[in-house]
Image (cartoon, rainbow, N blue to C red):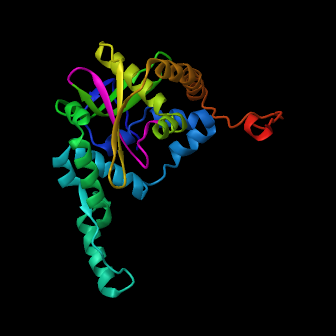
Amino acid sequence: MTEKRKPGFYRISSEEYHATSALNKSGIVHLAKSPSHYKWNKDNPDPPTPAMKTGSALHLSVFEPDEYKKQVRVAPAVDKRTKAGKALWAGFERGAQGKIIIPAKDEDVIKNMKNAVLRNETAAALLADGIAELSGFWVHETGVMCKLRSDWITGNKIVVDLKSCLDASYKAFQKAVANLYYHWQAAFYLDGLTKLTGEEHLVFLFICVEKTAPYGVAVYQLDRESINAARRQMTPIIDQYAMCKAKGYWPGYVDEIQTLALPRWAIN
């Protein structure tokens, strides 16, 4: 059953956060495709993928190392085609119920990524003082309940988000921000934290760490133009969500014939 919470900050688990009814950045991305896609994904959530589990383990390792020890279990290398292997796996699963299970090969990768982040002087300085994995719920001006779960907020109100990636170079991550709507996340979080605290939050930083050796690390600050663009792009989407929620109507794509033109790169 989906939970509801009053506006404010909460120290809750990731599972409790995701089970709470409120609009988050991922929901806005689904809404941008269509309200119908949002509703389907909300009612039929996909189970965590192996990559998502590894990402969660990395975040715990960097931001909450004590929780990493409690919540993460490394899967044993067993042959589940054999009777003995099946028995060993069944015993492991019983003991790891409710935990984040990662393959043994990912344990060293996570350790190397964490060490790379902490060796980076800029990233390490940001992580020296702050609060991790804080969940916040607030009422948007449309009356919609919204939520966020920040990776890290420093003592001087800088919001930090850790991103694992294949390529942390400037051009590659610039493209990732646009394609994966990371600028929406930045604007959404800054506005939510400002509303929750009554203090303006202006700076959103990404700590990017590559998934393969040499585990390159880069730290980027999203500029004001990108933040403002995100606000312009999200405003009509959140407005539409408020109307859909009020009417209980979740339309799909435009229900009419649309004239389709090839993109410019396909014509020239």
Residue at 63% x, 39% y: name it: 36
Magenta stretch holds residue 156? yes
Query: Could you tell whether 105 is left or right of 46 in the image?
Result: left
Residue at 68% x, 37% y: name it: 252
The answer to whether residue 46 is above or below residue 203 is below
Residue at the far bottom in the pictured view: 83
The answer to whether residue 16 is above or below residue 195 is below
Count the numbered circles shown.
0
Q: Quadrant of residue 185?
A: top left
Q: Quadrant of the C terminus?
A: top right
The answer to whether residue 128 is above or below residue 99 is above
Residue at 29% x, 52% y: name it: 57
Query: Could you tell whether 195 is left or right of 256 in the image?
Result: left
Q: Position of residue 150 (x, y in %)?
A: 32, 33
Q: Position of residue 228 (x, y in %)?
A: 49, 18
Q: Quadrant of residue 53?
A: bottom left
Viewer-closest of 158 and 99:
158
Q: Position of residue 48 (x, y in %)?
A: 42, 54
Q: The magenta stretch spans which residues?
A: 155-170
Q: Quadrant of the N terminus?
A: top left
Q: Position of residue 246 (x, y in %)?
A: 57, 25
Viewer-closest of 173 and 247:
173
Viewer-closest of 248 and 241:
241
Residue at 34% x, 46% y: name it: 216
Viewer-closest of 268 and 176:
268
